Image: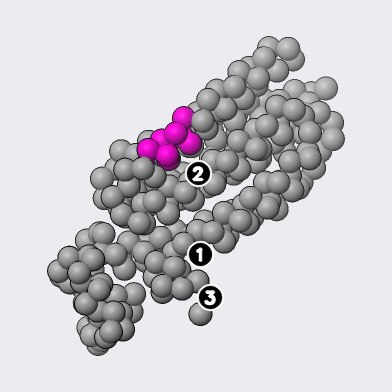
Amino acid sequence: MNTAIDLMNGAMMLSFVILGLSQLMAMVRLVIGPDTGDRILALDTMVINAIGLIVLLGIAQGTQVYFEVTLIIAMLGFVSTVAYARFVLRGDIIE
Amino acid sequence: MTLELFAVYATLFLLSVGAVFTLVAAIGLVKLNDPMTRLHAPTKAATVGIGAFLLASMSHSFALGQGSFHELLVLAFLFVTAPISANFIAKVNLHKRACDMPDAPKHDEMWSTLDVPESDRKIATEKNGPATG
């Protein structure tokens, strides 16, 4: 049992590191991205990685108080991606 | 006890799967060299990665003995919205002529996402180069 829990904690730390790394990589794409589509995609990926970081924080602390936070960030991320895309496509968000 | 041990191992497995998929998504986002190819890496892999993290959170709460199914709601929301936002970003790529353009439609003048009003056409071509892309 104890080895399993140790292994799980190790995997959790590794996941924290990997999510931070992918957040940094998305930031690189956000800066160098040659076109608007790439920048929108990088921001969308960063929102999704942020959801993953919050979920991992919930696992690490053993609580479920972060559930609402993840739900709200998921909704905000989707709406903001669609708003960016619509602004590029139509020149306006709500016509 | 056995159930809790199983939940711990499931959490371990799901965390590893999520980490691998998230890393692959991020590498794809940085390394691939065409906007449409870049689009497909994170929108698929990151959804599976975050899905695995959410399932890991669920099985971890079962391991602690206070099981919950809340995370399924976030999971369903992400799985529904990820293709929609990917479709919007693909349309942005087409609109900005940032990728290989498809052939013109057979029964129409041009694709609707490229169909800018007459008054804006000059601005669109000035910004994005020649219309043939």
B46 relative to A53, above or below: below
Residue designated by label 3: A94
Chain identity of mark 2: A
Q: Which residues are magenta?
A: A21-29
Quadrant the C terminus of chain B occupies: bottom left
Which residue lies at the image location 39% right of the left edge and 70% below the top edge? Answer: A89
B7 relative to A31, above or below: above
Which residue lies at the image location 49% right of the left edge and 50% below the top edge? Answer: A44
B99 relative to A11, above or below: below
Q: Amino acid at mark 3?
A: Ile
Lateral position of residue B103 relative to residue A25, left or right: left
Using the image as rendered, state which of residue A28 and residue B88 is in the foreground: A28
Residue designated by label 1: A83
Q: Which mark is residue A46?
A: 2
Quarter of the image where one finds residue A16: top right
Helix, strand or loop at mark 2: helix
Quarter of the image where one finds residue A7: top right
Q: Earlier in the sequence, mark 2 or mark 3?
A: 2
Asked whether residue B62 appears in the rendered view, the answer is: no
Q: Which mark is residue B76?
A: none
Q: Residues within 10 Å of mark 3 (few under 14, many from 20)?
A: few
Indicate whether residue B29 is drawn in magenta: no
Same chain assignment for discs 2 and 3: yes
Q: Earlier in the sequence, mark 2 or mark 1?
A: 2
